[in-house]
Amino acid sequence: MLLQNCAIVAGVKTVLSALDLLVYQGDLLIVEGPTGSGKTSLIRTLSGALPLASGYAEVASISLRPLPARRIPPLRRQLGIVTQHPLFMDEESVLDNVALPLRIAGVASTECRARGTKALLEAGLAGAAMRRPSELSGGEQARLQIARALIHQPLLLLADEPFAHLDTDSVELVESLLSFAHARGTAVLLTTHRPTLLACKAKRLHIKDGRLVQ
């Protein structure tokens, strides 16, 4: 992933400018900053949800400026995306939800079930496979969302405030999942405004006055 002299605009406000960033396969990067500093806008831009205002950016070998609508699905097939407010299909089971990226990609149902079962086991959710997402706790839903984001083995995981609204035990479980993904070679870029044990093995950047600084 490469960003060169980029600017990100949300509404009429420039939230980030002069943005330069280089992320290699297997990197672990933490972007820290207070609420409203532009962390979510950064994640939305990298995932193709928010247009890049200026500069050059490339994610998974796809240019973000311009980014025509037809290029968004190929981009997102290379990404795992974790948002602050996860969306699930509550009419379907936890197992069906975690396997959704595989189903969209046309993977056979037997393989979807096998890989989904493995993903839930790794996330500590094996016993919840046949439950509905709404029956899970907040921490369990956070782990389900991360497991779903990783099931198709993306090149890059984008996680927006993955520890928000979680208790200490849930934070530790989520940290373990993210660390496991990083150990398997997935590049991980996460935003946070709270301390994390992952910081000891990550490159840390801070958002200050609309700039990304060391």
Image: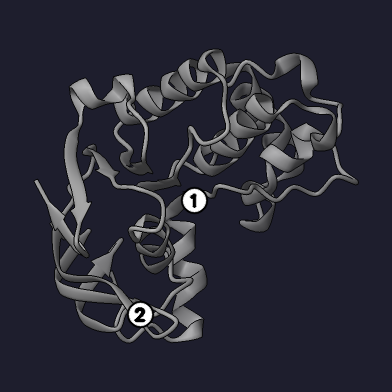
Image quarter hosting the C terminus: top left
Of the residues shown, which amino acid type is indicated by label 2?
Lys
- Callout 1, which amino acid? Ile
Give coordinates of residue 105: x percent, y percent. 61, 56
List the single residue furthest toward the right. 91
Location of residue 157 by image quarter? top left
Element type where label 1 sits in the image: strand
Quarter of the rendering containing residue 12? bottom left
Residue 13 numbered mark, or none: 2
The image shows residue 120 at horizontal and vertical percentages of 65, 24
Q: Position of 213 compared to 169: left or right?
A: left
120 left or right of 42 in image: right
In the rendered structure, find residue 171 and report the number of the disc placed on it. none
Is residue 85 or residue 207 the one in the foreground? 207
Furthest toward the left, the residue is 214
Q: CA distance from mark 2 to mark 1?
A: 24 Å
Closer to the chain start, of discs 2 and 1, is 2
The residue lying at 79 percent from left, 36 percent from top is 133
| Residue at 22% over, 72% down | 57
Give the answer, above or below, for where 180 lies relative to 163: above
Would you name the residue on which mark 1 appears?
81
Say which of 79 and 17 sits in front. Answer: 17
The residue sitting at 45% across, 42% down in the picture is 161
Task: Tell me if mark 1 has few (under 14), some (14-19) or many (20+) residues whose alpha carbon lies within 10 angstroms of its own.
Answer: many
**Image quadrant occupied by the N terminus:** bottom left
The residue sitting at 62% across, 15% down in the picture is 124
Q: Residues within 10 Å of mark 2 (few under 14, many from 20)?
A: few
Q: Quadrant of residue 26?
A: top left
Q: How many marks?
A: 2
